[in-house]
Structure formats: structure tokens, C-alpha cells
């Protein structure tokens, strides 16, 4: 009888453990990659950054000033992202949150990009933005909205998204990101502007383009 009880309890624990595992999540990497090594003496980087002795923390470790100033949008895409992450505010280390200010020239855009490590929640404070994101394969459904001042929109982690200023005046938005270092992959730059360039044959087939178009696009970066 005791034995059966033991087996039942063991089964219950195994089930609970399995349930726990099923709801577990890999920790956020906080950087593009972290190649494992056996000898910690040769380690040069940890998951995130090293920590200051908490007794030595000061207000400036949690402070940034200047987000009232617009970024310069005089560039090809007509937008500028001012990032306030763990590199600007060291106190953000391990807290899983950061902030950006995005300025848009008239008809400027924040071009299609993804944040590999963060969901984004954006609020428009000035102007009119056409925003959207695309869901993963195989649906690749486009979800869009036109936003006005005070409107808030969410771009889920990892999905390709964009914002386009529909107005003939500058636009401004702020956004929170669920990572101390959400990372950015701008699709056009990563695909056509990689260093060194991707073999044009790869992109010709992938995008079903004439090879001359591919080499022209690559020459723009
Ligand atoms: C964004 O604006 C800042 C501040 O004006 C400027 O230093 C930076 O070069 C701009 N970045 C781009 C990509 O235009």
C-alpha cells in the first residue's frame, strides 16, 4: 500500500514538474549571440552587463536627459530614432525595459524592421502615422492602423513592423520596449546592405528579381 502511495505521489510530482517545464521560457539573450566556452577565465561577456555594487548606485545611474530634442530626420528614410536603453541608462541593466523617441519628417518613415528581443508599445504625440506589422509564416497577415496624437499601438516581439508619416508636417512618437536592449534589424539594410554583401544569386532567387536590380539595391548601401 505504501509503495502504491509513493508511486502516486511520484507520478503527481512528475506531472507537476512537466507542467512547470511546459510553461517555462528561455531567458532573454540580451545580445545577438553568446558563444559558450568551457573556461570562464577566457569569458569576455555575460548575459547583459556586470553589476555595480548597489551601495555605490547614484541617481544619475537611473537618469537620462534630452528626449525633448528632436532627432535629425534629414536622411534617406526621413526618420530618426533616439534610443534610451541600458547603454544610456546603466540602471536599466536586468530590468527588461527601455525607451525610444522617434521623429518623422513629412512623409518620412521608420522603415520595416524587427526587434529580436522586445515587444514595443508606441504612443503618437504629434502627427498622423500609418503603422503596421506582419504576422509570421505561413499567414503573413498585415495588421495596420492609422494613428493620431494620443493613440497607442503594440508591435509584438520579433514581428516586422513600420511607421509612415502620412502628414506634410513632422510627426513624433515615443515607444517603450520590453528589453534593456531590444535590438533592431532593419530589413532592407540587413538583406541588401549586409557586410560583406550577400551573394546576389541568393537575393535574385529569394526576391524573384532581376540580378541587376539586386546589385543596384546593394549599391545603395
Ligand atoms: C539622428 O539625430 C541625431 C541628433 O540630431 C544625429 O546625431 C544622428 O546622426 C541622426 N541619425 C540619423 C540616422 O540621421
Image (cartoon, rainbow, N blue to C red):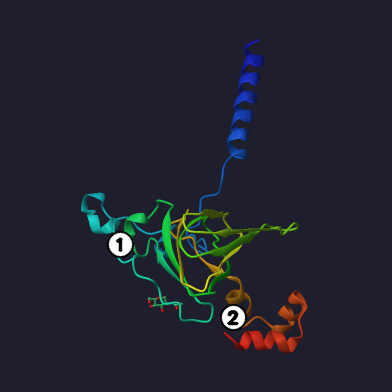
Q: Which of 142 and 204 is in front in this view?
A: 142
Q: In this view, does 143 lie above or below 26?
A: below
Q: In which quarter of the image is residue 60?
A: bottom left
Q: Earlier in the sequence, mark 2 or mark 1?
A: 1
Which residue is the site of mark 2? Answer: 193
Q: Quadrant of residue 161?
A: bottom right
The reply, left or right, for residue 60 in relation to residue 36 is left
Taking the spot 63% from the left edge, 15% from the top edge, the residue there is 5
Q: Is residue 190 above or below residue 60?
A: below
Q: Nearer the viewer, residue 90 or 121?
A: 121
**Which of the labelled discs sits on residue 14, or is there none?**
none
Which residue is the site of mark 1? Answer: 64
**Residue 9 at x, y percent in the picture:** 61, 20
Which is closer to the viewer, label 2 or label 1?
1
CA gap, disc 2 and disc 1: 32 Å
Taking the spot 30% from the left edge, 62% from the top edge, the residue there is 64
Task: Sort mark 1 into few (<14), some (14-19) or many (20+) by Cα contacts within 10 Å.
Answer: few
Rendering quadrant holding ligand 1: bottom left
Amino acid at each position: 500500500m505504501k509503495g502504491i502511495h509513493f508511486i502516486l505521489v511520484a507520478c503527481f510530482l512528475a506531472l507537476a514538474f512537466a507542467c512547470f517545464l511546459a510553461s517555462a521560457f528561455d531567458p532573454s539573450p540580451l545580445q545577438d549571440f553568446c558563444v559558450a566556452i568551457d573556461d570562464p577565465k577566457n569569458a569576455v561577456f555575460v548575459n547583459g552587463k556586470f553589476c555595480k555594487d548597489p551601495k555605490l548606485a547614484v541617481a544619475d545611474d537611473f537618469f537620462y536627459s534630452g528626449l525633448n530634442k528632436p532627432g535629425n530626420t534629414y536622411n534617406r528614410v526621413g526618420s530618426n530614432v533616439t534610443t534610451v536603453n541600458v547603454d544610456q541608462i546603466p540602471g536599466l541593466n536586468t530590468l527588461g525595459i527601455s525607451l525610444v523617441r522617434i521623429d518623422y519628417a513629412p512623409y518620412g518613415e521608420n522603415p520595416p524592421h524587427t526587434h529580436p528581443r522586445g515587444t514595443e508599445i508606441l504612443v503618437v504625440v504629434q502627427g498622423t502615422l500609418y503603422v503596421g506589422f506582419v504576422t509570421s509564416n505561413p499567414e503573413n497577415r498585415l495588421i495596420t492602423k492609422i494613428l493620431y496624437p494620443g493613440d497607442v499601438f503594440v508591435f509584438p516581439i520579433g514581428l516586422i513592423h513600420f511607421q509612415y508619416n502620412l502628414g506634410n508636417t513632422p510627426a513624433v512618437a515615443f515607444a517603450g520596449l520590453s528589453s534593456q536592449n531590444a535590438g533592431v534589424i532593419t530589413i532592407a539594410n540587413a538583406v541588401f546592405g549586409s557586410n560583406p554583401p550577400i551573394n546576389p544569386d541568393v537575393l535574385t532567387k529569394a526576391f524573384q528579381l532581376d540580378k541587376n536590380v539586386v546589385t543596384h539595391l546593394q549599391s545603395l548601401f
